Amino acid sequence: MHITVAGKQVETGAALRVHVTDGLATITGKYFDHALEANVTFHHDLKARAGAHFCCDINLKAGRNVFMRAEGEGVDAHRAFDVAAEHLGKRLRRYRRRVNDHARSLAAQRDLPPAEEARQVVLSQAEEPELEEVALEEAAPPTNGHGHAMVVAEQTTEVLRLTVSEAVMRLDLEHRTVMMFRNSGNGALGVVYRREDGHVGWIDAPAG
């Protein structure tokens, strides 16, 4: 497994890199031994809980189109990684059987149409103007000159063919808030998303 360790204003010396490598090898060897690569990033977060000065983000590619994410906080970088790794291990234990079943089913998907490409963009969020200080016609958010909010990032993403349970599994494993997929059962587009109450919502669009 290829492991990348990076720090944002955090020193990532040899001892920390060995700690990360050994920790990930133990977790992936126990729960998901065909992981391909991992990106581990350390940074400071002033909004973290009291005493937790360091944060760690783990992004693990565990197979074709299978990604997992975990986060942790701690008083030092080693502890932050340990917490993130523990979260990753718990998630893998919970979904081990489903992940393994899904990985085995990837071969069967060779006869299915390939994943579709979609355009994913991030739009700027304009601050609300002070109505007492500006005219009403000036109160609209900044646009690109065509009446649309400015695009600040754009990339290509894949819309995978999944069952609803597989989509929910990926939503949790990848630590996402929303995911679009094409239902492998009926061919319709669907969306699963994390609600504010912690439950998962499902938007099911009728096929064709």
Image (tube, rainbow, N blue to C red):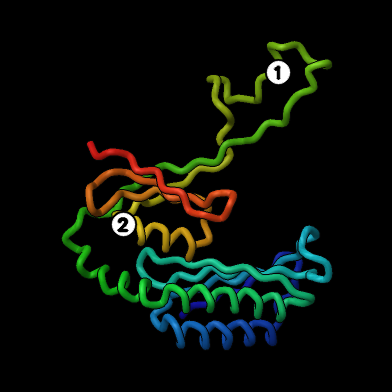
Q: Do the residues labelled 1 and 2 touch (CB within 8 Å)?
A: no
From the viewer's perspective, is the residue at label 1 or at label 2 nearer? 2
Residue at 60% of width from left, 25% of height from top?
Answer: 143
How far from the left and from the top, in percent, is residue 37?
47, 74
Give the crowd class for mark 2: few <14, some 14-19, many >=20 residues within 10 Å: many
> For the residue labelled by badge 2, is the local secondary structure a helix, a strand or a loop?
strand
Give the crowd class for mark 1: few <14, some 14-19, many >=20 residues within 10 Å: few
Q: Which of 196 and 154 is in front in this view?
A: 196
Residue at 35% of width from left, 67% of height from top?
Answer: 64
Q: Which amino acid does label 1 sit on?
A: Ala
How far from the left and from the top, in percent, is residue 17?
64, 82
Left or right: 3, with 118 as reference point? right
> For the residue labelled by badge 1, is the local secondary structure a helix, a strand or a loop?
loop
Residue at 49% of width from left, 67% of height from top?
Answer: 68
164 vs 207: above or below: below
Q: Which of 86 and 22 is in front in this view?
A: 86
How far from the left and from the top, in percent, is residue 48?
76, 63
Residue to which mark 2 is pinned: 162
Left or right: 97, with 130 as reference point? left
Residue to which mark 1 is pinned: 139
State which quadrant residue 58 falls in: bottom right
User: Looking at the rendering, in which quadrant would you find the C terminus?
Assistant: top left
Question: Which label number is shown at residue 56?
Answer: none
How far from the left and from the top, in percent, is residue 189?
32, 44
Left or right: 57, with 193 as reference point? right
Disc 1 from disc 2: Cα separation: 43 Å
Q: Which of marks 1 and 2 is nearer the N terminus?
A: 1
Residue at 78% of width from left, 15% of height from top?
Answer: 134
Counting the numbered discs, the total is 2
11 vs 130: above or below: below
Q: Which amino acid does label 2 sit on?
A: Leu
